[in-house]
Image (cartoon, rainbow, N blue to C red):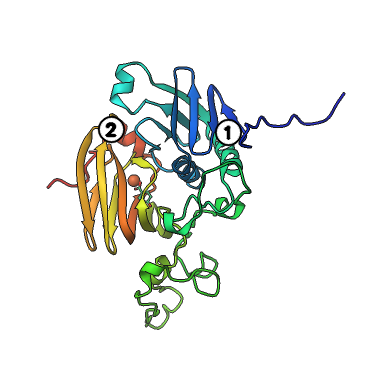
């Protein structure tokens, strides 16, 4: 009996086909195609890779990641839904929607394999458009370094002994070209006698301004369920994030425009322009997509309490954390 492994199916452009459940994924030079029993959908392949890399790197994140108005994933913490049309009122009304629930590890494995095969040399799905090569064309090379970045998660706080280290010129994180004016001095810490080991501070601007990726929050401090997620943003957040909890945004520098839609239907609700210093509470029942014309610094304050999605869906908590 032959022990040879079957070669993967590759199209004439050199790309492998993938499937999970009844979903099938194929790509050509410019587009990713998603086929399911009710329909087929396509989206620009660079955009698709940016979305599924976030699913992979963030372990499907909180709630829903809509890749566009049709396709996306919903986190059920252990399992995950892959859907087409489910969060789109018109698709649901026409019964064109399709959803399958997978073990999160299985979908993670398939998305990782798609990324590995479909990401060409030079394309970095986390980079700003002006800092990456092209995703297009027939298959050429690969970019494992860009795909293997782990999401930075400080256990307590960046810079503490044994925790996530600082970013420096020496370890490969120069200041981004948009932040060369950011002060890089360290704060002075004058602890009371006996508290020398209990007080810690670091220059957050100097840390975040050295991020080499966009739209990829790093957890810089963690106290129980309170997560400070800092990120640099430039161009467009690829996913339209459907929250399963409230998120607070603090615009630390520059400006981001947010399109807010109803989380279930996608109906437009608001356009919010956040300028440096602005604070917003994003409700638990919306989806949002951000646009940053110039690299900007954003603090996303997350509540990691695992009981929240159920408490919102049972109506125990209001979707809005403040009444104005
Ligand atoms: C969000 O969905 O709230 C989000 C995701 C990634 C970011 C910023 C915000 O970089
Ligand atoms: Fe969000």
Q: As drawn, is 259 to the left or to the right of 143? A: left
Look at mark 1 in the image and give the residue it sits on: 106
Question: Who is closer to the viewer here, 105 or 270?
Answer: 270
Question: Who is closer to the viewer here, 49 or 135?
Answer: 135
Q: Is residue 177 above or below residue 321?
A: below
Tell me which residue sits at (30%, 43%) in the image.
288
Tell me which residue sits at (40%, 72%) in the image.
206
Give the alpha-carbon distance from disc 2 to disc 1, as whole Å: 28 Å
- Residue labelled 2 has its Cβ within 8 Å of some atom of ligand 2: no
Q: Quadrant of residue 162?
A: bottom right
**Quadrant that contains the N terminus:** top right
As drawn, the residue found furthest toward the right would be 1
Q: Secondary structure at mark 2?
A: loop
Total marks in image: 2
Q: Position of residue 134 (x, y in %)?
A: 50, 50
Q: Position of residue 148 (x, y in %)?
A: 58, 52
Q: Mark 2, mark 1: which one is toward the viewer? A: 2
Q: Quadrant of residue 94?
A: top left
Whether residue 218 is visible here, answered yes or no, is: no
Q: Is residue 121 above or below residue 170?
A: above
Crowd tier of the residue under label 1, counting other residues whose Cα lies within 10 Å: few below 14, some 14–19, many 20 or above: few
Tell me which residue sits at (23%, 55%) in the image.
274
């Amino acid at each position: 009996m032959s022990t040879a492994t079957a070669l993967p199916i590759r199209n004439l452009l050199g790309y492998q086909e993938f499937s999970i459940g009844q979903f099938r994924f194929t790509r050509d030079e410019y587009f990713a195609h998603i086929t399911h029993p009710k329909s087929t959908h396509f989206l620009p392949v660079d955009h698709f890779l940016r979305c599924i890399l976030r699913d992979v790197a963030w372990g499907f994140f909180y709630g829903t990641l809509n890749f566009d108005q049709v396709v996306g994933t919903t986190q059920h913490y252990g399992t995950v839904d892959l859907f087409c049309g489910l969060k789109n009122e018109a698709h649901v009304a026409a019964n064109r929607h399709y959803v399958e629930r997978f073990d999160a590890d299985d979908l993670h494995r398939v998305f990782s394999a798609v990324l590995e095969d479909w990401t060409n040399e030079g394309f970095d799905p986390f980079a700003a458009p002006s800092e990456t090569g092209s995703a297009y064309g027939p298959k050429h090379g690969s970019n494992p370094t860009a795909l293997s970045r782990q999401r930075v998660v400080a256990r307590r706080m960046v810079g503490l002994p044994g925790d996530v280290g600082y970013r420096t010129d020496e370890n490969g994180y120069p200041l981004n070209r948009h932040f060369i004016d950011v002060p890089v001095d360290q704060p002075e810490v004058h602890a009371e006698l006996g508290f020398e080991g209990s007080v810690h501070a670091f220059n957050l601007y100097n840390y975040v301004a050295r991020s080499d990726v966009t739209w990829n929050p790093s957890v810089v401090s963690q106290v129980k369920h309170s997560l400070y997620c800092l990120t640099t943003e430039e161009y467009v957040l690829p996913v339209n994030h459907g929250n399963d909890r409230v998120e607070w945004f603090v615009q630390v520098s520059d400006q981001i425009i947010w399109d807010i839609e109803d989380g279930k239907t996608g109906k437009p609700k608001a356009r919010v322009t956040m300028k440096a210093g602005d604070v917003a509470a994003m409700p638990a029942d919306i989806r949002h997509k951000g646009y940053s014309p110039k690299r900007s610094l954003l603090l996303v304050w997350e509540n990691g309490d695992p009981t929240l999605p159920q408490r919102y869906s049972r109506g125990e908590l209001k979707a809005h954390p403040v009444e104005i």
